[in-house]
Structures are given as C-alpha cells and as structure tokens.
C-alpha cells in the first residue's frame, strides 16, 4: 500500500549576492521577483522508500549538507534525488541556511506520510523550447554545418527531433481523494531572466507551479524538475523577462493540468519504488572500444563565449572553433582546451524506480540526444520493470554538460562545457545501465539506502551531522515599514502600480514562508479581503540604499473596487481600480454577410509591466453605426472577433467612444471611424529575444553590441 508525503519551504536568500550561470561581476541581487522554494515528495510502497527534493537553484551545490541533515531518517544517495530546477536567477553560492531549509522540507514531507494513490501521465508541450545548437544536434545525423546554418527541417527524424516536447507528471492523491502532489518534469533552460537581471527568481518553473495550483480548492504541492535541457532554451516571445517567465509558466501549467487530469483515471494504491547509487570516477579509463575519458576537467574555447541565451561579448567569435579533424585527440577530440574546470573527477549517479518509470539522475546538463541514448540503454537493461525512462538533470551535484561524441566535436558551447572529454556521457550512461539492471534483478537486494556495489559509493556514515540550526539571512525581525510614496488614487486595469517604503537593509525583514507584500480589497463593510501576495506571481520589489520599491501589474479582470497594498502589517493609502479605457479597435472586415471587428489590449510597457498579456481583446459586445444607424456586434468564439450580420457591405463604419466593452468590462475609450477591409497592425513591443537581445561588453561589464543573428532559433 502506497504512502506519500509532500512539503515545500521558502529558500529565498537575502539580497546582495551574485547569480548562478551568468558571468556578470557587475550584477548583484537587489530584489525579488519569484521566490525560490524547496519542494519534497516522499513515496513509500511498504518495503522501500524514495524521495525527490527539488531546489530552485542553478545546481544542487548543497547536496552533501542536505544529506547530513536527513541521514537519520534513512535517506541517502541511493534513495533520494536532490535536483535543481537550474534557474539562473538564484544564488551562485547557496549556503548552509538553504541546505537547512531544504532538509526541513524533506523532513516535513516525511512526517506527512499518509495512505495515497498515484499515477503517471504525459502531455505535449510544443511551444516552450527550442534547440539553441542545431548544428551540433544535426552532427548526430552525420552533418557538419557551420554555426547558424542549421535548420530543423534538416533533421531526418523530423522537425520535433531536435527537442523534447513531452511533459511527464506524477499525480499523487491522498487515499481520501485530496490532491497531495504534482511532480512535473520537462526539458528546457529556465533562463527567461536575462544576464542583466537583478532579481532573485525561480524563473518559469516557479511561475508554472504557482499557476497550476490556482486551479484547485485544496492545491497540491507542485514540483518541477528539469531533464535534457543542455541544448534546449525557452521561447523568448514576450516583451521582457517577467512576461517571458509568466508566459512559459502559463504554458507549462496548462500542460501539467492536462497530464494531471489524464492521470486521474489510472490512480492506484500500488506503486513500487526503489533506488540505487553508483559513484563514477573519471580516471582516464577506457569506457568503450577505443574510447577513453579524461582524468581532469577542462573547458574548451567556446565556453568563454557563453551560449545564445547567456552570451558573453565573445559569443559569435568562438562558437564552433575547434581543432582540425586531423589533429583531433583521442580524449578531448577537436576541443581547444583553454582552462581547467573547478570540479573533481568523481560524481554520484542515482537511479530511482517510481512505478513503471526509471528516473535517471545526471550530475549536470545533458543534451537532448545524449539523454535519449542514456534512457535507451537504461531501458534495455531494466525493461522488465519499466516502460519509460526520464533524465533528471542537475541531480546530486554538478559536473558541467554531457553531450554525445558527435555533438562534442562540433564544439558549440555545450561541447566546450563537456569537461571530461569526448566520451564524458558514456561513464554516466554505464552507471545508469548497471543500476537499472540491478533494480530489475529478481534476487533480493540490500535496502535502498545502502548500495550493493563494492567500490566507489558515497558513504553517508562519514558525514558529520550539523549540531544546530543556521541563522537566517531574512525574517530576523518584524517588518517595520514606513511608507514613503503612495499608489495613485485611481488605477486602471493593465496599469503597473508602484509604491515605496523604508525597511531593513538587504530586505532582511522579509518573512520566510509567509507574505511580505500583499494586495487587499476593502469590502462593503470595510473588511480587508486578501487578493494576491508576493508568494505568487504579481509582485516585484527591489531595494536601493534604504528605500524599497515594489511594482504590481493590475490584472485585466481584477474586480473594480477600493484596494490597498500591505507591507508586513503597514498599509498604503487606498486606491480605486477601474476598468481599462485603453482597448483599441483595429479594424473591420467582411466575412460573407458578417461584419467582423478586431481589437487589441493596451500594449504593455517593456520597462515596467510584469505579466504575459494577451494581445487581442475578447468577449463582450461592440456598438457601431452605419450611416448614423446603430448596430451591435457580439463576440464570436469561433472567429475570435465581434461579428454582426449586415444587409450590404458598408464602406465605412463608426465605433463611438466606449462602444467596445469586452468580456471583463474594459472599453475602447475613443471613437474611431473604420474603412471596412482595413485592419491596423497591433501596436505591441517586440519580443525580448534570447539573453535579452544584448551581450555584455568588454570585461563582461555593462552591455556590448548585438550578438550575431540567431537564424537557427527561428
């Protein structure tokens, strides 16, 4: 009989530190956009117990500290996967406080174990990732193309083969039907927040889990882990980093809900779980006929240029630079070795069985094709117990990238960041295969917290358990805000509101696990009703000197009324929210006997707005006149426009002021005369583009020139 427990903890650190992944010595965290969390899920089938702990960090660099704090509960590398979502807007050097908070999440999940049911399901998520290194991927098909010249149509396995569009989800309910956990797994870099970003953020995984939870009366713990994201980047099709994270989050949450609903039909109280661990050591050994790995970790020249979504000023100059084929080495292939990488040659590889799935931990960032090969090999070895295998990247530690040998020799960023040579991925693949075979073996094994392998296994008994809790960098004192600037007295929907206050240095008075900022609506009797807070997606705040400033974008459908913001327990002055008057009627066309109208929302401000905004208005009615005679067009879901039957096609129509009222009550405030057959182009800011569209200048400070055209991204 299955038992399960899930829990989350806030791990957002204090301000002032630098970020993971982007080399920007001039950038420090000076605010918070989407809080960072640790999410834990524990599964117990009655014989064995496994756990997954995911952290909103760039890499799980506090794994050993976490293990030391939970070893007394029976968790170790053989039955616990500690994985990072890989946000590049998290701290570069997570500290012992974050490890303590993550361990607390796992302890809370362990203590919450209860009878449960669970099931796996999948959903297609086809508008959320792109392969940033198509030419390297196409090398797997025998092609040797110059960077920037590849096209997805060249892949003989189809346009979808350069990426992974499958979202996998494990649904866990209590035996009483209460939703307990939704563990979602997808492959894409969480880099919607650009190299110039100054806000701590869980990026789109944080937005996705928050949007997903909003659809439940009793929300489950929502968890996200990353997969073969090494060469997969997000769609940068929104106007700024906040909107990109929000849009990617909305898309991911929608796919999560599809998979969640699909899993509901196959929930079962039996879910076998198991696990094992093997330590791989890069010692210059043979890993296949004529295939040898390195003894030490080395970066290649393309590493110093960064990648398309995090380019340095050298990007475009070093991407794809490599040795001539005739001078390729046996270990490092065509790599131009430039500097040592800071990682030891040993890494822990964990494989978990959860039902009929194998979860293959990789201590770094595998490319989509390297991951496919790992999964195929593991399924061949453990197919008796599994129908599917998935890569959990950034698991247990970090040792750079893992590419195929063919991709490696192209020496794009990913190959330059694959540090133990051309055959780096094979050693991990061999570990997966051995562990999968071990899990599938019919003979009894040792408990999952102890490895049956004779050598090279991490020994938790050597760790010294921490003696006390760690002082928190935040939440150390009550919020003592003094409001400096107030919101305006009247605010239209779609507007971005700001206010400021004086608070503690580095945001140290921000509480942990509870709201710092909130929006309240005042009821008819003056009572305060919570609408939204900074545990969600609507707020961004930052600090300069002793002044803190927050932004909040009013949603398109926020009910009209009187509102106020609250910092801790200090409230701003009240303000009225009213419908927007900024809709714009774009034009009218004829479709048979129907007159069809189109209109847009007010465009977002790329320097201030925070949410993914739908471009076109929907719903409601549109009043118009033809030769002074009034007509009404109703919203047509099929045409996604307002339509009205007319006797004859008019040459001109007039829409009076406030003649358009959309489904939320927003209006087009100005009258307009339209020539039928003409539709204006919507006025909208352009997409931000990979990496924010600009690269750092010389010495990695400030902004330099535009990067090379990313033809292969479109």
Image (cartoon, grey):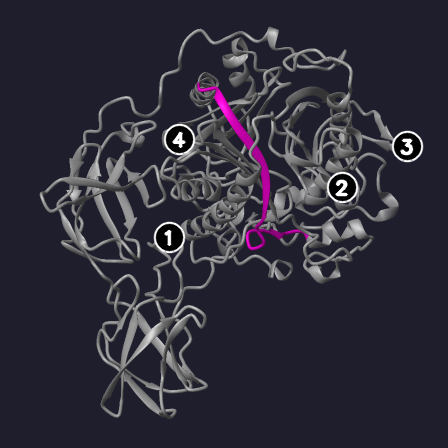
Residues shaded magenta: 112-133
- Look at mark 4 in the image and give the residue it sits on: 12
Disc 2/disc 1 C-alpha distance (Å): 38 Å
| Viewer-side residue, 640 vs 405 | 640
Q: Earlier in the sequence, mark 2 or mark 1?
A: 2
Does the magenta-highlighted stretch encompass residue 437? no
Q: Quadrant of residue 282?
A: top right
Q: Position of residue 108 (x, y in %)?
A: 43, 19
- Look at mark 1 in the image and give the residue it sits on: 611
Q: Earlier in the sequence, mark 2 or mark 3?
A: 3
- SS of the residue at dot 1? loop
Disc 2/disc 3 C-alpha distance (Å): 16 Å
Q: Earlier in the sequence, mark 3 or mark 1?
A: 3
Residue sticking out furthest to the right: 289
> Local crowd at mark 3 within 10 Å, few (<14), some, or many (≥20)?
few
- SS of the residue at dot 2? loop
- Look at mark 2 in the image and give the residue it sits on: 404
């Amino acid at each position: 009989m299955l038992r399960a427990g899930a829990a989350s903890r806030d791990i957002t650190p204090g301000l002032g530190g630098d970020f993971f992944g982007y080399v920007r010595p001039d950038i420090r965290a000076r605010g918070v956009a989407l809080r960072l969390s640790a999410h834990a899920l524990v599964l117990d089938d009655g014989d064995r117990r496994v756990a997954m702990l995911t952290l909103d960090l760039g890499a799980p660099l506090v794994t050993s500290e976490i293990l030391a704090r939970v070893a007394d509960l029976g968790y170790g590398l053989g039955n616990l996967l500690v994985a990072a979502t890989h946000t590049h807007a998290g701290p570069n050097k997570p500290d012992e406080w974050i490890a303590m908070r993550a361990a607390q999440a796992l302890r809370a999940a362990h203590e919450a174990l209860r009878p449960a049911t669970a099931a796996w399901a999948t959903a297609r998520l086809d508008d959320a990732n792109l392969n940033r290194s198509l030419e390297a991927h196409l090398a797997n098909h025998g092609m040797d193309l110059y960077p920037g010249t590849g096209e997805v149509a060249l892949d003989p396995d189809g346009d979808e083969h350069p990426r992974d569009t499958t979202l996998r989800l494990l649904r866990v309910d209590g035996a009483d039907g209460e939703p307990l956990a939704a563990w979602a797994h997808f492959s894409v870099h969480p880099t919607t927040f650009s190299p110039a970003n100054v806000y701590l953020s869980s990026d789109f995984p944080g937005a996705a889990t928050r949007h997903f939870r909003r659809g439940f009366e009793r929300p489950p713990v929502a968890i996200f882990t990353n997969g073969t994201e090494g060469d997969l980047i997000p769609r940068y099709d929104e106007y700024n980093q906040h909107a990109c994270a929000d849009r990617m989050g909305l898309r991911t949450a929608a796919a999560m809900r599809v998979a969640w609903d699909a899993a509901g039909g196959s929930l079962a109280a039996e879910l076998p779980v198991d696990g094992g661990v093997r330590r791989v050591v890069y010692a210059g050994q043979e890993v296949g006929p004529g295939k040898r790995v390195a003894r030490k970790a080395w970066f290649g020249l393309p590493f110093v240029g960064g990648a398309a979504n995090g380019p340095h000023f050298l990007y475009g100059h070093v991407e794809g630079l490599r040795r001539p084929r005739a001078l390729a080495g046996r270990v490092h292939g065509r790599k131009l070795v430039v500097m040592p990488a800071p990682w030891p040659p040993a890494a822990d590889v964990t494989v978990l069985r959860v039902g009929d799935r194998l979860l293959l931990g990789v201590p770094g960032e595998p490319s989509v094709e390297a991951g496919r090969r790992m999964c195929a090999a593991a399924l061949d070895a453990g197919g008796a117990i599994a129908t599917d295998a998935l890569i959990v990247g950034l698991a247990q530690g970090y040792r750079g990238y893992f590419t195929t040998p063919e991709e490696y020799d192209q020496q794009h960023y990913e190959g330059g960041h694959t540090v133990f040579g051309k055959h780096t991925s094979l050693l991990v693949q061999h570990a997966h295969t051995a562990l999968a075979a071990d899990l599938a073996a019919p003979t009894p094994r040792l408990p999952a917290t102890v490895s049956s392998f004779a050598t090279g296994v991490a020994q938790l008994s050597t760790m010294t358990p921490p003696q006390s809790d760690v002082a928190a960098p935040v939440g150390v004192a009550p919020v003592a805000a003094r409001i400096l600037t107030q919101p305006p007295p009247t605010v239209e929907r779609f507007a971005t509101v700001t206010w400021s206050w004086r608070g503690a240095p580095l945001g140290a008075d921000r509480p942990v696990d509870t709201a710092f900022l909130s929006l309240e609506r005042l009821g008819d009797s003056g009572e305060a009703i919570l609408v939204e807070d900074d545990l969600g997606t609507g707020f961004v705040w930052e600090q300069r000197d002793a002044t803190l400033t927050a932004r909040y974008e009013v949603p398109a459908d926020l009910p009209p009324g009187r509102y106020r913001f609250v910092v801790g327990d200090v409230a701003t002055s009240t303000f009225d929210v009213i419908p927007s008057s900024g809709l714009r009627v774009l034009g009218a066309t004829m479709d048979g006997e129907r007159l069809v109208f189109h209109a847009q929302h007010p465009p977002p401000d790329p320097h201030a707005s925070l949410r993914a905004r739908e471009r076109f208005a929907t719903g409601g009615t549109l009043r118009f006149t033809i030769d002074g005679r009034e007509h009404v067009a109703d919203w047509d879901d099929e045409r996604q426009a307002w339509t009205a039957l007319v006797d004859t096609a008019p040459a001109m129509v007039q829409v009076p002021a406030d003649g358009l009222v959309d489904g939320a009550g927003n209006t087009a405030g100005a009258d307009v005369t339209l020539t039928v057959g003409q539709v204006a182009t919507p006025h909208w800011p352009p997409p931000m583009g990979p990496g924010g569209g600009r690269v750092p200048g010389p010495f990695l400070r400030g902004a330099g020139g535009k990067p090379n055209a990313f033809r292969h991204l479109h």
